Amino acid sequence: MLDPAILFSSVLNGLTTGAVYALIALGLTLIYGVLHIINFAHGAALMVALYAVYLLKDRLGIDPYAALPLVVAGMFALGYALQRFVINRASHGKDENILLVTLGLAIVLENLALVWFKSDTRSIDTAYTLSTVEIGPAMIALPKVIAFFGALAVAAVLLWILRGTDLGRAIRAVAREKQGARLMGIDVEKVYALSFGIGMACLGAAACFLLPAYYVNPQVGSGFVLVAFTIVVLGGMGSFAGALAGGLLIGVVESIGGLFLGDSLGQMGIFAIFIAVLLFRPQGLFGARG
């Protein structure tokens, strides 16, 4: 029989990982909720953010957590510029063009990373990388604990922006009815770019929380974005509560699955739940019926 202390530790590890998954998925679901498109460049953008954190630490000695404002602001600016000057202009108002443009951006970013950084896997060392925190019978890595609370804090700020600010009201208006929002004087194209930028800023925050205990290479984003897509569909397309709950659930399922099946097969449970949700509740856990 499995030791309850081991199971408890596995659940806690899953929650800490799941919070970062949720943060990545929140950026993806914001972009989908407003622009109504799937951003295939999301994983490549996460890779860019991870390299930014790595370079700030390696070249300038800036701690990943201290780099949070810089990376978040940089990713927001990158996202705003990409949507405003590349995606919007190249799409000509057609959703299928947007999908192809974001896919093309992903390929370009990944290949640029291969040119500049080769295929080597890189990581950083900090004074707290191997530190642990005792929580009951479990010992949890300190960077994971910080990532958990940091991701929840960023998610709370994002929800406040969406529900308590004029920008948030404009975003929600555009997401619900684009033409009606335009008639009310809202600059829809600007809201699109701001929403894309905020979604990318979430990736910047996630990168700062990830790298002290993780690594970066040009292909690192693909695994995360696959899980993020699963979380978005699992929680309900466009649902922020669903993305948050789905991320935590997926993290726990992955951790427990790895405990029983090994790390290489731990993600089987994720896709088993995903298929079950598609079969029995295709609108997702928090999605509304069409």
Image (cartoon, grey):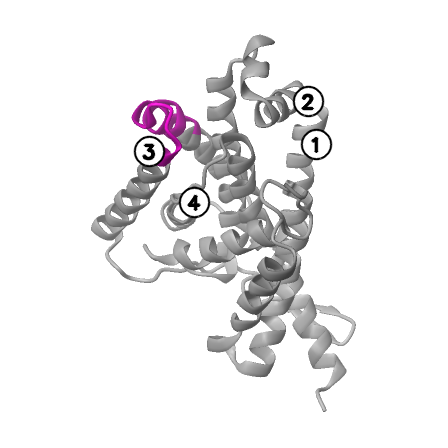
Figure quadrant of the C terminus: top right
Q: How many numbered discs, if any?
A: 4
Residue sitting nearer the eye, 52 or 89? 89
Secondary structure found at label 2: loop
Labelled disc at residue 133: none
Alpha carbon separation for disc pair 3 and 4: 16 Å
Secondary structure found at label 1: helix
Q: Position of residue 19 (x, y in %)?
A: 63, 54
Can residue 15 be seen here? yes
Secondary structure found at label 3: helix
Q: Which of the two discs, 3 and 4, labels the residue nearer the N terminus?
A: 4
Alpha carbon separation for disc pair 2 and 3: 31 Å
Tags 2 and 1 in contact by the CB under 8 Å rule? yes
Q: Quadrant of residue 172?
A: top right
Q: Which residue is mark 1?
A: 160
Q: Give the amino acid type for the residue marked by disc 4 in the picture.
A: His
Q: Give the amino acid type for the residue marked by disc 3 in the picture.
A: Asn
Secondary structure found at label 4: helix
Q: Which residue is mark 4?
A: 42
**Of tags 3 and 4, which is closer to the observer?**
3
At horizontal 52% and vertical 70% (from top left) the residue drawn is 267
Taking the view exactly as shown, the residue that stands out farthest to the bottom is 1
Q: Which of the two discs, 4 and 2, labels the residue nearer the N terminus?
A: 4
Q: Which of the two discs, 4 and 1, labels the residue nearer the N terminus?
A: 4
- Overall secondary structure of the magenta section: helix
Q: State which region is magenta.
A: 80-98
Q: Which residue is mark 2?
A: 165
Q: Which of the two discs, 1 and 3, labels the residue nearer the N terminus?
A: 3
Q: Quadrant of residue 278?
A: bottom right
Q: Position of residue 165 (x, y in %)?
A: 68, 22
